[in-house]
């Protein structure tokens, strides 16, 4: 009995709301239902991402408390100007991605392509700055492993640093900081690279007009991903770069 | 159509669907400016010696920025109850992960610090 009612109801709803847009999948009753299901699915994926990065953030929290002096000294090796500029660059990229969603909603094709290109450009600038930061760490032997050099942390005065000298034992723990630094910023950068790859796929499709005739979902869901990557960096920046910058 | 009599297991006639909201560039602009301001603020605050409050302020600013991004750039503020609930549940589960793991590590050497 119940089934009959539901079936009748579904048929009526289908007849009422039926749309012939090519992006509308037949197993959804209405475009709105399809849209919400898509957003829901995207958020479920992002929640798994939160758990993934969450494990790294937890490791950071724990080791920062265990080896605080090493974390402070190692954190002060990072460049605040580069980190701040990169934060601004990433927020700008996110801003253009937000505008891209608006452009798709308003069916403004050329503005959509422009904002997607700008999103990509700022994303690539971020990765470029990151390259120079990594390169400096490589040159100073601050990449964890066999050739890691603790001398700047054991004898900071010899390098003109105003840090407190650390015992070799604690100085070795700066490797824990740099391991987490590379793991966290590296995973973040990998997400950026994947995002740039997706943008390079979305731009020609936007140019072709795929997203300026009412089909916003790919742009909207990619924007969710891109903003999520932003949020990860919003936490990484203060936690890695700004641990203890004030004069002791 | 009162809520308790609204039978819509297939999420078809959900009235929330009609509320689809297009966020304007003006809102995005305000959010953008706010995020940049908070970035400057967190760098500025890092150079002031506030003792234990330095990391607390840094995290408070980061959380504020993240919430602004989630609500407006990611449109959660304008989404249906289902989406809001999903996002909130995810962050709540994350807090459980942090709390339970941390309580383990804190209690291992209980009284030995």
Image: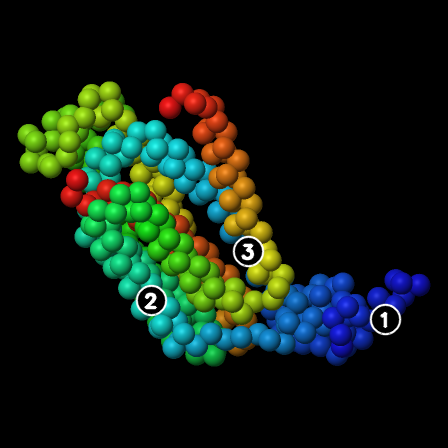
The residue that mark 2 highlights is B34
| Residue B7 visible in the picture | yes
Q: Residues within 10 Å of mark 3 (few under 14, many from 20)?
A: some
Q: Position of residue A6 (x, y in %)?
A: 84, 66
* Colouring style: rainbow
Q: CA distance from mark 3 to mark 2?
A: 22 Å
Q: Residues within 10 Å of mark 1 (few under 14, many from 20)?
A: few
Q: Please, which residue is most extreme toward the right here?
A: A1
**Nearer to me, A4 or A165:** A165
Residue A143 shown left or right of residue B104 in the figure: left
- Under circle 2, the secondary element is helix
Q: Which mark is residue A8?
A: 1
Say yes or no: labels 3 and 2 on the same chain: yes
Query: Mark 1 and 2 residues: CB-CB less than 8 Å, in contact?
Result: no
Query: Mark 3 and 1 residues: CB-CB less than 8 Å, in contact?
Result: no
Residue B93 shown left or right of residue A137 in the figure: right
Q: Position of residue A159 (x, y in %)?
A: 8, 33
Q: Label 3 marks which chain's residue?
A: B
Q: Which mark is residue B87?
A: 3
Q: Quadrant of residue A134?
A: top left
Q: CA distance from mark 3 to mark 1?
A: 34 Å
Say yes or no: labels 1 and 2 on the same chain: no
- Asked if residue A106 is positioned above or below residue B68 in the image, the reply reads below
């Amino acid at each position: 009995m119940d089934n009959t009612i539901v079936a009748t109801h579904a048929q009526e709803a289908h007849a009422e709301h039926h749309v012939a847009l090519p992006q509308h999948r037949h197993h959804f009753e209405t475009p709105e239902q399809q849209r919400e299901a898509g957003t829901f699915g995207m958020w479920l994926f992002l929640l798994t991402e939160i758990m993934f990065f969450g494990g790294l953030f937890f490791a950071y929290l724990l080791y920062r408390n265990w080896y605080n002096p090493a974390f402070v000294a190692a954190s002060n090796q990072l460049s605040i100007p580069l980190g701040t500029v990169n934060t601004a660059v990433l927020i700008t990229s996110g801003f253009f991605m937000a505008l891209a969603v608006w452009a798709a909603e308003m069916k403004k094709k050329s503005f959509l392509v422009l904002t997607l290109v700008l999103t990509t450009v700022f994303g690539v600038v971020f990765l470029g700055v990151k390259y120079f930061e990594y390169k400096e760490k490589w040159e100073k032997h601050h990449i964890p492993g066999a050739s890691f050099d603790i001398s700047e942390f054991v004898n900071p005065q010899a390098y003109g640093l105003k840090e407190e000298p650390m015992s070799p034992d604690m100085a070795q723990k700066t490797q824990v900081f740099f391991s987490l630094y590379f793991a966290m910023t590296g995973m973040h950068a990998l997400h950026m690279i994947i995002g740039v790859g997706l943008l390079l796929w979305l731009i020609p499709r936007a140019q072709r007009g795929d997203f300026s005739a009412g089909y916003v979902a790919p742009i909207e869901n990619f924007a969710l991903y891109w903003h999520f990557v932003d949020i990860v960096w919003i936490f990484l920046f203060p936690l890695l770069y700004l641990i203890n910058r004030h004069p002791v | 159509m009162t809520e308790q009599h609204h039978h819509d297991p297939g999420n078809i006639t959900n009235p929330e669907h009609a509320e689809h909201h297009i966020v304007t560039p003006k809102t995005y602009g305000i959010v953008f400016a706010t995020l940049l301001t908070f970035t400057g603020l967190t760098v500025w605050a890092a150079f002031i010696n506030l003792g234990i409050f330095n990391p607390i302020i840094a995290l408070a600013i980061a959380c504020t920025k993240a919430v602004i991004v989630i609500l407006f750039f990611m449109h959660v503020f304008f989404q249906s109850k289902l989406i809001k609930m999903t996002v909130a549940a995810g962050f709540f589960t994350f807090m459980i992960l942090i709390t339970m793991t941390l309580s383990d590590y804190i209690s291992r050497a209980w009284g030995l610090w």
